[in-house]
Amino acid sequence: MSQSNTPLKRKKTENGFSENGTPIPNQIRELKRATTVDYVYRDQESKDKIKPLNGFVTPLLTDLYQITMAYSLWKNNRHEIPAVFDLYFRKSPFGGEFTVFAGLEEVIRFVSDFHYTKEEVGYIKEMIPDCEQEFLDYLSKLDSSAVTLYAMKEGSVVFPRVPLIRVEGPMILCQLFETTLLCLVNFASLVATNAARHRIAVGKDKVMLEFGLRRAQGPDGAMSASRYSYLGGADGTSNVLAHCFFGIPIRGTHAHSFITNYSSADELLDSSIKDTQGNVHNLLEMSQKYRDELGFTATITSELVAFVAYARTFPNGLVALVDTYDTLSSGVPNFICVALALHQLGYKAVGIRLDSGDLSYLSKAARKLFKQIGEQFRIDYFEKFSIVASNDLNEPTIIALNRQGHEIDVFAIGTNLVTCQAQPALGCVYKLVEINGSPRIKLSHEANKITLPGRKTAYRLYGSEGHPLVDLLIDDNDVAKENKKEDSNQIPKVGKKVLCLHPFEEQKRVIVTPVQIEKLHHIVFDKGQLTMPLPALSDIREFCFQQISKVREDHLRNSNPTPYKVSVTKELFDTLHNLWLDSVPIKEMK
């Protein structure tokens, strides 16, 4: 793996550029992908200078109009005006009422490392041939030293309209960040939310695995899906690269091809195995002996041979795929025979995987047989064999299995988890809310598309039972007053009544007396510097679990969840509606 000082690198002699960075027409350019592994960058990273995890994440991972707008801002001398943008979403995905915020670390890494290389400036010159050289020189010196990011903690349970990230800085930089930040947050939060919903369906006492690599949207989609599935609730992944890069626990069994590659006992050239004392035995003969003793003589011999072959390799890790031929007539009995032989040698098989059929019925039937054999041979752990289910599982299927009753211990979820098949996009937006100290609003005939103007800070108000009741957005000027120890009536206080209003419907209002208050926005990047260490993925995951445990069940449920209240103060409500009225032209009727 090569190392690079920037995530994107190109050979100067082969990439279609002259020495001064000018594109050479009609020449094939080679785009070299840098590794996404963070440890490759460790010797190049310092406390305050970190790099993206993905080599594709550079300033050129953007839409063309961001660059053309940046040029126009520069040309019209609007590029350095202070601006504030909010990144948020309008509606929670999957018909639910909650979302898990993810992707913040990648946002911080991108913003911290933001700069244009000589080659990247050359590409911009190619795309906008008539742009002035002074603009290109300006871009070559541009960095994030004037940018500040406020954000909710990654792994937070979040709700519509509450800004996930607030970006403050020169207008040109804030504008250039838009597409990349949305790309980094949208899919990450969607997958994390999908994983959290599947986790809730699976239950706390079961294991949930992400097995979706082969069905993911390409290598980058697969890596992101593994990372954020783990953050949102998966206990492990089948993705080896995700294990190596992110430290996600790795799990796996075997495929049907491993079973069908054997057709007779003659193809198992060596069936010997050493017991835990070092003595050699014939595992196939031992398994066949148990098959005869138990009367399982109608099972498929080649399947038994395949199980023996795998058990010889992993005597303490056998999870047998039992549905290649017939689950209950062959697969499960053959597994039991091999498991008994392993037990005799001092080993313990782990369990079975079901990949087709009626998972509820098959799991219960398998468990019954495990218990029966365990009692017959006085082996107590047999009835506790792990039963893994796969077979195109999704949230509704898992909920249905729960209603039917089942004996499944592990849910291995692939396609529907990593592709978010139930909803392909979250729909985060990135909107200008303040320019040069003045609030800005974007209007629409659809109320949910109207922006909330100005710099805002969110507070979460908790009730007496420890559940959040409402997220309250307040004018950030009131937060500034509090920070300066000045009196502000808008900052919520424990034990004090707080009037919370719907942003657009004044009649929807509620008075809350919070017993606990949580400030949701924190500075994570200030004027080019990290303000706190980036948490480990496992810590973000644990925080996500804690967040979900605090939310009321009716907000989390799969069917007809109760809407969660996102409100504004009276002052912010008035600011919004006054600006709204001022921005709407008065029609004249004749």
Image: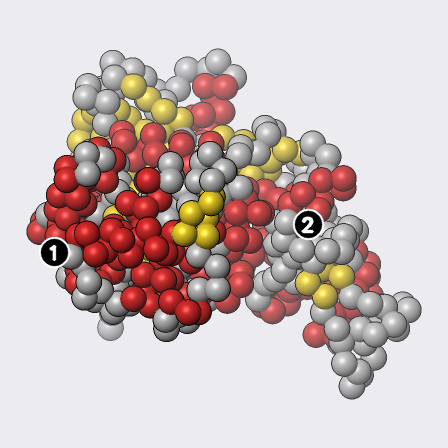
Q: Nearer the viewer, residue 497 or 261?
A: 261
**Location of residue 377 (image quadrant):** top left
Q: Position of residue 78 (x, y in %)?
A: 65, 54
Q: Is residue 209 above or below residue 217?
A: above
In this picture, residue 45 sits left or right of residue 236: right
Q: Which mark is residue 361?
A: 1
Check disc 2 and give the amino acid type.
Phe
Q: Residue furthest right?
A: 19
Which element carries disc 2, helix, strand or loop?
loop
Check disc 1 and give the amino acid type.
Tyr
Question: In the image, which is nearer the foreground, mark 1 or mark 2?
Answer: 1
Characterize the local packing of mark 1: few (<14), some (14-19) or many (20 or more) Cα atoms within 10 angstroms: some
**Location of residue 298 (image quadrant):** bottom left
Q: Earlier in the sequence, mark 1 or mark 2?
A: 2
Q: Position of residue 152 (x, y in %)?
A: 44, 36
Residue sitting at x 57%, y 47%: 244
Q: Position of residue 159 (x, y in %)?
A: 31, 43
- Judge whether residue 435 can be spotted in this image: no
Which element carries disc 1, helix, strand or loop?
helix
Characterize the local packing of mark 2: few (<14), some (14-19) or many (20 or more) Cα atoms within 10 angstroms: many
Q: Colour scheme of this structure image?
A: secondary structure
In this picture, residue 269 sits left or right of residue 288: right
Q: Nearer the viewer, residue 226 or 185?
A: 226
Q: Which mark is residue 270?
A: none
Residue sitting at x 68%, y 49%: 114
Q: Position of residue 484 (x, y in %)?
A: 52, 17
Residue sitting at x 70%, y 74%: 127
Q: Which residue is mark 2?
A: 114
Q: Is residue 143 above or below residue 447?
A: above
Q: Is residue 284 above or below residue 524?
A: below
